[in-house]
Amino acid sequence: MEFTIARRVGRRARGMLAGGGAGVVGAVGWLVAAGGHKPGGPLTALGLAVAVLVVGIRERARLKKPFHLMVDDFGITLHDAELSWEQIAAVALHHPPQSGDEDDDPVPPRLVVWPAPGVTLPRRPDRTFDGRRRYTLVDTGDLDQGTAALGAALAQYGGARYETAPRSLRPPTPVTVSGPEHRVPGAERVFTAHSPALGPAALALLALSATLVLPLVDLLLTRRMPVPAQLLGVWFLGTAFTWWATARTIRHWRRPLRLRIGPAGIAVRDTSAPADFRIPWPDIAAVTVGPAPNATDTRPWLTVWPLPGTPLDRGRTHLVDGHQAYALIRLDRLPGGAPAVLPTLHTFAGERLTATPTDLPA
């Protein structure tokens, strides 16, 4: 399959050139209209517009440089090199670290390759700390065909060379080898964290909240201060807090924590989220049960490692060796904990599952 960048990079360049040009014209007009008084604002706007214009020019210049990327049964072909699969030790879609909030849109991954010993490319290798020589080939955010299409081509032709999860979890496994999810008889299993005390607690808090509101009703009807003026702020804050606690308790009572595992995939319902988080098995590269990635807490988490390019409606929670991880649920919050969940998870996840020895059922 051949991949191109002309459409996406060209569209980005045209947008930057148009925006930067309009910004320059507007900033110059602002500077002229100001007549030399307080030029700081117009000059700042002019500098930003020029910077956008320069980036647009650089993006436009990229289109004149040779670009070629082909992934097929031979291997990976570039405009300046050819690598057969025998010359490739591993290939991956590597997510770079994100400087901002992890809840922001993630930076598109980069296509990276680890050549076999003795094989080099006519470009500078990446700086790594594991002793493995690695090259970055392309930023997938530039590809017209998108990350998912590149991942599908790597899965089809790369086989076990295509790394979809950190090597510290498991050795590379061909994506085309699916788990047993469609060969397992029976329906999905549901694990729900019921708390019998939440119902009475919600009713008690509701009664307390209603009691605290009664003086407000009296104030509206009789114009009499329900409490001394010195305690008015405390009473208001206490009333607001009890209503907040009531709403939160009722939400936890009506929408308890729930984990569903079945032929369709994994679904988690968290009381803090408006909707269930679902991920089907074909989009899952690996599933781990154990401490959350890069965490000192040893309590077991169910963590999902999606295939690169999979669109999900939740931001990642961790990034390990360029692979995105989603810590979904702490299993000790469910009845029976990890030992109760692991048999079902192993039944449906198959080779995708990796569990720490301490979490395996006896």
Image (spheres, rainbow, N blue to C red):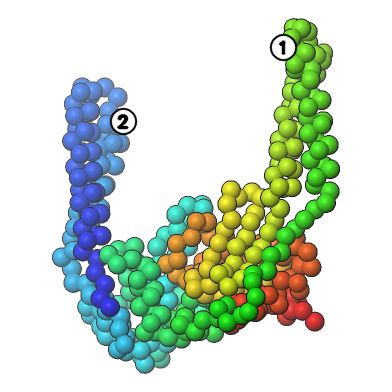
Camera sees residue 132: no
Pick the quarter of the image with the N terminus.
bottom left
For the residues labelled 1 and 2, the Cα–Cα distance comes to: 51 Å
Q: Please state if 318 lies on the left or on the right of 99 as rendered.
A: right
Camera sees residue 4: yes
Foreground residue among 352 and 69: 352
Give neighbour class at mark 2: few <14, some 14-19, many 20+ (Cα, 10 Å): few
Q: Please state if 233 lies on the left or on the right of 128 as rendered.
A: right
Q: Nearer the viewer, mark 1 or mark 2?
A: 1
Pick the quarter of the image with the C terminus.
bottom right
Disc number for residue 220? 1
Residue at 67% x, 72% y is 289
Q: Which residue is mark 2?
A: 41
Image spot of residue 188 (x, y percent): 64, 70
Residue at 23% x, 33% y is 27
Labels 1 and 2: the sequence-earlier one: 2
